[in-house]
Amino acid sequence: MWKGQQVCGITSQNAYDYFTQNDDGRGKERGELVSSILLLLERRDNGYQSRWDKVWADARCQQYKRPDHDDHWIWNFKFYNAPVEDLKHIFNLIRKG
């Protein structure tokens, strides 16, 4: 809310892009990991497909995929609020292409 007006909803893309859950005191770390993961996966270099293949094959990542898209990966609400340990796992999975 800003000046009595709703800026965004809890599950809106604006909320995902600009706010991070901080109820555990790790919001900054969580936000940095989410941003780093998204940037790595967007980078169109030689490792692009390899990174995405790792995400698709990883059981831990599956809980963060929206189920309504069978052939396209879209991160769900849980991803943006995931435990830091899960986000570190995803980051380490994809950081080397």
Image (tube, grey):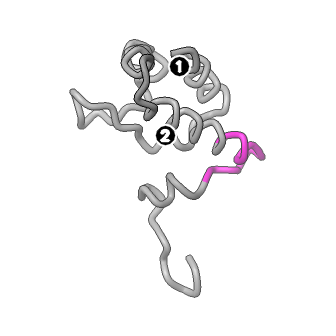
Alpha carbon of mark 1 to alpha carbon of mark 2: how far?
Answer: 19 Å
How crowded is the residue under tag 2: few (<14 C-alpha within 10 Å), some, or many (20+)? few
Q: At 63% across and 33% down in the image, what residue appears?
A: 83
Residue type, mark 2 in image: Lys
Image coordinates for residue 36, horizontal then vertical, percent? 59, 36
Image coordinates for residue 50, horizontal then vertical, percent? 41, 14
Q: Which residue is mark 2?
A: 78
From the viewer's perspective, tell me whether residue 29 is left or right of residue 69. Answer: right
Image coordinates for residue 21, horizontal then vertical, percent? 63, 50
Image coordinates for residue 56, horizontal then vertical, percent? 37, 18
From the viewer's perspective, tell me whether residue 16 is left or right of residue 87. Answer: left
- The answer to whether residue 51 is above or below residue 87 is above
Image quadrant in which you'd find residue 81: top right
- The answer to whether residue 57 is above or below residue 71 is above
Image quadrant in which you'd find residue 13: bottom left
Instruction: Report the front residue among 56 and 85.
Output: 56
